[in-house]
Amino acid sequence: KQWYQRRVRGARMIMFIFIILTTLLSLGTQNPVIVSPRGSPRPPPCAQTCAGVSLATRDNWWGTSVIFLSVDISECNFVEPPILTVSLQGDDDTYSSNVLGTSTVRCLTSDSFTMYFPGYVQNNYFSYPGSPNLALVKNNNWTVNWIAVGYTC
């Protein structure tokens, strides 16, 4: 089982790196085009892509009956809230793939965003032990991968 988990984790990381590199290489010298109802369009050099990974061992995961994650994206230098894509990854396929809130972003600003994970999707195949907790998050190496596209000027 450990061999399988390491192989799945490795495959997921390779896929994430591939997606990031493909995105960055596809941009080449062109800046991304942002189609957004927020504000007016800006000059092409203002549109930027920024990506990161929030590790369970380093970043601001907190909560007791509901797990929250606060992510600082201030280094991206966005001047307004960006368009954001997130994904949850963990060593434990059963738990991390069935947790609620894996794409729920709250309190998005130009400098940060917060996610929350209130519980699990219930089904007939697995009985989940209550809500996610910090020990589960850290023991199973949960990470949130994120890509933000926004304006920097």
Image: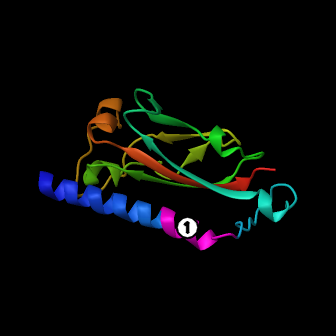
Provide residue 131's location: percent of width, then percent of height.
35, 37
User: Residue, x 81% and y 50% (percent of image)?
Assistant: 153
Q: Is residue 100 above or below residue 12?
A: above
For the residue pair 87 and 104, the one nearer the viewer reads as 87
User: Residue, x 26% and y 36% (percent of image)?
Assistant: 139
**Region rendered in magenta:** 20-29
Three-letter amino acid code of the residue under disc 1: Thr
Q: Is residue 114 above or below residue 96?
A: above
Residue 1 visible from this viewpoint: no
Q: Is residue 125 above or below residue 105?
A: below
Q: How is the image coloured?
A: rainbow
Tell whether 4 sits left or right of 21.
left
**Mark 1 neighbour class, 10 Å CA radius: few under 14, some 14 to 19, many 20 or more:** some
Provide residue 48's location: percent of width, then percent of height.
69, 57
Residue 108 sits in which quadrant? top right
User: Residue, x 85% and y 62% (percent of image)?
Assistant: 43
Furthest-bottom residue in view? Answer: 26
User: Residue, x 78% and y 57% (percent of image)?
Assistant: 46
Tell whether 8 sits left or right of 14.
left
Q: Is residue 132 above or below residue 100?
A: above
The quadrant of the picture occupied by the N terminus is bottom left
Q: Main secondary structure of the magenta part?
A: helix
Furthest-front residue in view? Answer: 29
Residue beneath disc 1: 23
128 within the magenta span: no
Provide residue 144's location: percent of width, then percent of height.
45, 47
